Amino acid sequence: MIAWGTLLTILSSLFFQGIVIKTKATLEGRKGPGLLQPLFDIGRLLRKGSVYSNTTSLIFQIAPIIYLASVIVSTFFIPFGEAQGLLSFECDFVFFAYIMAIGKFMMIIAAMDTGSGFEGMGANREALYSMLVEPAFFILMGSMALLSDSVSLYDFYTNMYASSHLTYLLVIVGIFLLIEIALVENSRMPVDDPKTHLELTMVHEVMVLDHSGFDMAIIHYSTGLKFALFGALIANFLIPAGASLGVQSSVFLMVQAGCAVVIGIAESFRARNKMSKNPQWLLTLSATALIVFLASLILTHKFILP
């Protein structure tokens, strides 16, 4: 069985960050780098050796590999149209989420392994933001389980209850939440600014300050792949059922490109939150997901009044 979801997600990851950067450059009135510049940067880093501090242990050296592996394994759960992912079983969305969490956990303890106060501070923030955004993801998955009367990612899309216009509104809100979760998971605006050079305000960037060469290339690619992973979840909402493979693949790639453009626009017109405001903002995502969940209960006639 060909896992089209996995293959197209990996393909999308090759140009996702390039489209984001190009969109931001266009909106700022600059020519900007080419779409493939992030790939050229990764290739340049791959040709360099990694430098390890004497204060770090084996954890620091293996963390980037485990981070990449966790994201790649997560793509195995991505369905494509009427085709299941390489892995599909009941409650697979829980496994999907925590496989990605393993990679993030390894990057957090790798940052702490350096013994740097700055990297430890960034790891602390990264762990906090991931913890606060997790309820929003699982509440959204619970809403999809209600609307599809199933508990696997594949069935979420194939059995979606769509007998009401309100369902389409909930899907739009769900897409919005997935984009925001992707921004948080990759430490982008409004919780972090990847262009900042002040260690005191960094989150993800300060965590990887000690990584170099091959390891840094893996981290950069993993970020693009994780963006494409969330883009794939969004694309499955919009893939036309019963269409040919070519049409479905084209829609998938166009949605991925659209997600990259939306993220580029969002990062261009949003200011970074104050550090103290980030937890409150993240909790509003969970509150929004809870509204979607309650609406799903009403739509599926499972809201029981006392």
Image: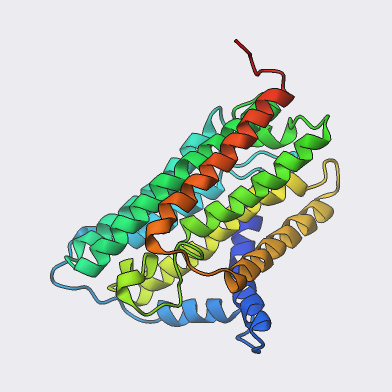
Residue reaching furthest to the right = 243
Foreground residue, 217 or 31?
Answer: 31
Q: Nearer the viewer, residue 136 or 279?
A: 279
Q: Quadrant of residue 174?
A: top right
| Res. 9 in view | yes
- Along the line of sight, which residue is nearer the eye, 65 or 200? 200
List x then y, in percent, for residue 116.
19, 68
Left or right of residue 263, residue 208 in this image: left
Query: Residue drawn 20% across and 67% down?
Result: 117
The residue at 73%/25% (across/down) is: 299
Q: How many numbered marks does the figure carry?
A: 0
Q: Position of residue 257 (x, y in %)?
A: 70, 65
Q: Is residue 107 visible?
A: no
Residue 122 image point, x, y percent: 31, 63
| Quarter occupied by residue 16 | bottom right
Q: Position of residue 60 (x, y in %)?
A: 25, 62
116 over 82 or under it: above or below = below
- Residue in the picture at 82% in, 46% down: 240
Residue pictured at 54% horizontal, 40% vertical:
287
